[in-house]
Image (cartoon, helix red, strand yellow):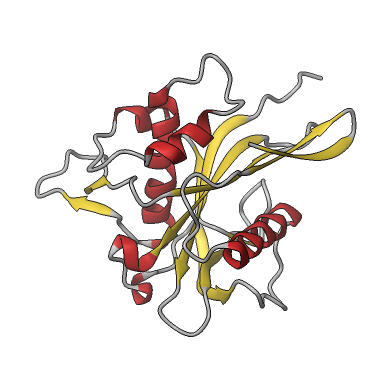
Amino acid sequence: MTAVRPVDAASILLLDRSGGHIRVLVGKRSSKHVFMPDVYVFPGGRRDASDRLVPVASPLHPLALERLALRAGRRCSDSRLRALGVTALRELHEEAGIAVGTPLSAPAEGSLSFRPDLSPLRFLARAITPAGMVRRFDTRFFTLFTDEAGVDPAAATASHELEDVRWVDIFDHKGIEMPDITVLILEELQKSIQENKSLPFGRAAPLYYTQRGRFLRDLL
């Protein structure tokens, strides 16, 4: 059996801190998905080859880029890391209808209708799907505050990719079925928020991966 290699992916934890509690946007994956159907996740998906070519309104913060580059491999260029930020915002738009960036008056057919603004993205964590799964991803998780991005929380809408899009208190998600890795990433967010509510750009990020059957957590 041929080993499945993990492919680059990005996911985004969109955070609303306008009320008394911090909420994160999640949605239910369709039952038609082969990978993790019928569970609630953050918007996200695999990196497209074209994501490297998308012009951006602003680049990633230097400290976020620096953290992303750690243990990324010698072949992982800045353009590939920047593309992960583009992936996160593209998926947010495709799955939840939220555009973060500068609107384009006449976008090319099949391209984004906005120029992504990567500057407010914080790098929160990285997780590599264990071997043996039908799909494997090397996923970078980003955080984004709605107020910093000029996003109206009420603008989030469901899609064929994510059903029942909803805002969930990051400290209270009882009754919502999430994959183990989603819960782990949410716990990382909780720790980070408790340490510093502003989520500094240069904060160390955990890396989750499996080696010789052991599930490990390192810091980047």
Q: Nearer the viewer, residue 161 or 18?
A: 18
Say whether residue 28 is visible.
no
Q: Residue 186's spot in the image, x, y percent? A: 65, 61
Q: Residue at x 41, y 49 (%)?
A: 121
Figure check: 75 above or below 154: above
Relative horizontal placement of residue 135, taking residue 116 as reference (left or right):
right
Q: Residue at x 33, y 72 (%)?
A: 155
Figure check: 207 above or below 4: below
Please identify the quadrant where the C terminus is shown: top right
Please identify the quadrant where the N terminus is shown: top right
Q: Residue at x 89, y 28 (%)?
A: 212
Residue 191 placement: quadrant: bottom right
Residue sitting farthest toward the front: 195
Relative horizontal placement of residue 139, taking residue 117 as reference (left or right):
right
Q: How many marks?
A: 0
Q: Residue 200's spot in the image, x, y percent? A: 48, 53
Figure check: 81 above or below 194: above
Q: Residue at x 37, y 33 (%)?
A: 51
